[in-house]
Amino acid sequence: MAVMENVNRPERIGRLGQVKVYLGKLFRIFIFERDWKVLPMSAAISLMVAYVVGNSMLVNMEGTLTGAFAFVCVCIWNGFFNSIQVVCRERAIIKREHRAGLFISAYIMAHMLYQAVICLLQVVIAMTIYRLCGIAFPEHGIFLPFGMLEFGFTLWLITYTADMLALMISCIVHSTTTAMTVMPFLLILQLIFAGVIFPMDAGTPVGCVSKLTISKWGTNVICAESRYNSQVSKSLFGALWQFRDVPEIGKIIDYINKEDLRMDIDRWAGSKQMVPEYASTKTNVAICWGILLLFAFAYAEIGVLFLLRVDKDKR
């Protein structure tokens, strides 16, 4: 009888085997249950941002900072929508399969690999649209010889980190309704504390919160790769131009134009607005990349810890 029981008992699949099984399941869902629709949605968003950013990227500090923030917003938006519902919508299935031998770590690892591929496809689509729309990218990267390739890797890393944050939330909440309720608050948090719209002093509590956001480090690394600190600024002349109807200011503007001093003023204004966090150095870029990767893996690990409690669900 003992021999017959061993023959009839199915062999339990190990962690790596479960990763393979669930990864195949996720790609089948992508193809047959229309999860691929995140790709055309990403293309539409990228097209809108490309239209807004136009050819201002790499031209001056203001255009580069606005473009960097817009790119980060696209990445975070795509990442959030990729995985905000993927776990909580099948929580009952996870509970049943976990009791049957599912490794939660294998399940999350499958999602991590799957989402990495989806984020890569989204970035390839976005970069293609940006390029076709005439957006300029650095000719040379900080680490790589091809600036566009390095820029694309940065966008992928930002998207993937946002994806892992949304995956963590999906592991914590118990319903898709709750997940979609939480998502706007996460998005607003990322936008406000990026340090672009509102200044964030490093030594204040607000500055500490800013350091915990994906948007801050994403903006930092994009500005660094775009050589923000070496660009000119139109802020000073732009401020004067707003008051050009004032006779005294009008004379100053006429003198600047007559003596061809506009570029000198823009360079001087740029030299006074350099941001140490946007320094185009390997150390700075590596730190930003490292922090984003740390965030991504921390979010995944937290997701595993919360999902391990799935057996305690009362439904």
Image: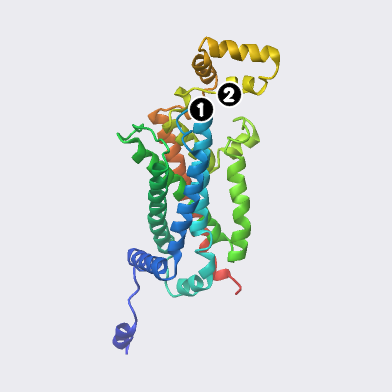
Label 2 vs 1, first from the N-terminus? 1
Residue nearer the viewer, 90 or 11: 90
Q: Quadrant of the N terminus?
A: bottom left
Residue nearer the viewer, 309 or 91: 91
Q: Residue at x 61, y 45 (%)?
A: 189
Q: Say the numbered circle drawn on residue 210.
A: none
View extreme (bottom): residue: 1
Residue bearing the label numbered 2? 235
In the rendered image, is residue 299 in sight?
no
Q: Residue at x 54, y 14 (%)?
A: 257
Look at the picture and state if 126 lies above or below 30: above
Label 1 SS: helix
Q: CA distance from mark 2 to mark 1?
A: 9 Å
Q: Quadrant of the C terminus?
A: bottom right
Residue bearing the label numbered 1? 61
- Tell me residue 272's x, y (percent): 54, 18
> Label 1 is placed on what type of residue?
Met
Look at the picture and state if 63 lies above or below 30: above
Do callouts 2 and 1 mark residues in contact (Cβ within 8 Å)?
yes
